[in-house]
Amino acid sequence: MSKIVTGATMSLDGYIAGPGESGFDLLFQWYGNGDVEIPSASPDVPPIRVSAASAGLVKPEWESTGALVVGRYLYDMTNAWGGRHPMDVTTVVLTHQRPDDRPEDDENFVFVTEGIEAAVTRAKEVAGDKNVVVNGGQMARQCLEAGLLDEVGVELVPVVLGGGKTLFGELGATPVEFEGPVAVVEGTGVTHLRYRVKK
Amino acid sequence: MSKIVTGATMSLDGYIAGPGESGFDLLFQWYGNGDVEIPSASPDVPPIRVSAASAGLVKPEWESTGALVVGRYLYDMTNAWGGRHPMDVTTVVLTHQRPDDRPEDDENFVFVTEGIEAAVTRAKEVAGDKNVVVNGGQMARQCLEAGLLDEVGVELVPVVLGGGKTLFGELGATPVEFEGPVAVVEGTGVTHLRYRVKK
C-alpha cells in the first residue's frame, strides 16, 4: 500500500543543515563515497555514488517512490533541479503562488496552493501504488502534525554541527513517538535508520 | 588504555532533554523495558532493567569505567545521587565552589575548581587503567573543545521532542567529525551508537 514517508540526512547532534545553511559537504559525504552509482534525472544534479550497503537500502526506496512533495523554498533553492527532480518522478510543490515561468502543471512539477493535505492528496493520485516522499523539514513537520506521515528515515552521519535546522523544525504537538527502528543499515560514513509513526 | 568517553540518550531530533527539562520519561524508557538488571550503587536511584542486547553493550562499559566527571548542575539536580553515583565509582565534580556540606574529598566525590582539564586529569588518576566517563552536555562540550574526548556514545530513541538541550550544546569550534559508528547495537526502543573523535 502507498505510504507517506520523509527522510533526512542528520548530524550526530540532530541538525539537517548547519548554521547559515552550512555543513552540507559533511552531511552528504555519503552521496559520493561509494562505488554504486544511482542515476539522477536532473540535468543539474550528478548521480550519487554510494556504498553497496547504502545502495541496497536507498535504491529500492527510490524505485518505490511515485511522487514527491516539497515546499517552495526547496524548489527555489535548487532552481527546480534544472527541470526534473533527480528521483525522476513528478514533484508536487506546495506554494502560496504558482511561479510565473511555469504556465501549466506537467509531468515534472505540479503546484498546489491549498495546503499540505491537498499537496499530499495530489501526490498520492500521481503515485498510485507507489510511495509519496515528503522533503524539507517544514513540509515533514506539517505532514507529521496533520497525521499524514507513515515513516521517517534518518541518515545519521558522524559529524557535530553545533547548530542549524532540526529534523522537524519547531514541531507544535510534541512529543511524538515512533516505532522502530524497523531497519538499521550501516553504510560508509552513514547509518540509515527507518522508523514508523505510531498511530 | 584509559579512554575519555561521553554518552547521552538522545531523541530522534537531537535532544538530550526536552523543553523545560521534559521528556525524560520517554528518553529513558529503555532503562526499564527489559529483563536484565544492572545494579545501582545509589540509594536514590533504582537499578535499571534493560534488554539483553542493551545490557550486552552497556554492562561491560559500566564495568570498565573507573571514574566520572560531572558538572555541578548535575550533582545538585540529582542531590548527589543520595551519596554515591549509581555506577559505583568516584565522581569528580567540576564546580566554582565546593559544597559546604562536604568538608573533604572522599571515595564518593572529589571536587575540582580549576577547570575541565584539571577535572579530567584528576579523574584519570582515580580511574587508573579504566575509562573516564564525562556526563552532562556542558561537560561533554568543554571536554570536546579541549581536545580531551576520545569517544561519544549515543543512545538514539524513537521520539521527537521538538526542542530542548542538544548533545553538545552551543559548541564553539564546529563542525567536528567523528569516526564510526564503531559499534551499532539495537536494543528495545533504543539504538546504541558509538563513535570515535577524529584526532
Image: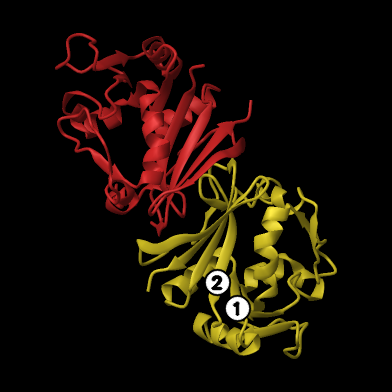
Chain colours: A yellow, B red
Q: Nearer the viewer, residue B148 or B64?
A: B64
Task: Find numbered disc 1 in the image and state the secondary structure of the residue it sits on.
Answer: strand
Up the image or down, A41 lies above or below B62; here it is: below
Q: Is residue A198 above or below residue B101?
A: below
Question: Amino acid under label 1?
Answer: Asn
Question: Whole-percent x and y of residue A183?
Answer: 53, 60
| Quadrant where the image shows the N terminus of chain A | bottom right
Residue B37 vs A111, above or below: the answer is: above
Q: Residues within 10 Å of mark 1 (few under 14, many from 20)?
A: many
Number of labels in the image equals 2
At x 49%, y 34%, the residue is B152
Instruction: Determine whether A126 is above or below B194 in the image.
Output: below
Identify the mark nearer the N-term, 1 or 2.
Answer: 2
- Residue identifier under label 2: A5
- Secondary structure state at the residue bearing disc 2: strand
- Residue that mark 1 sits on: A131
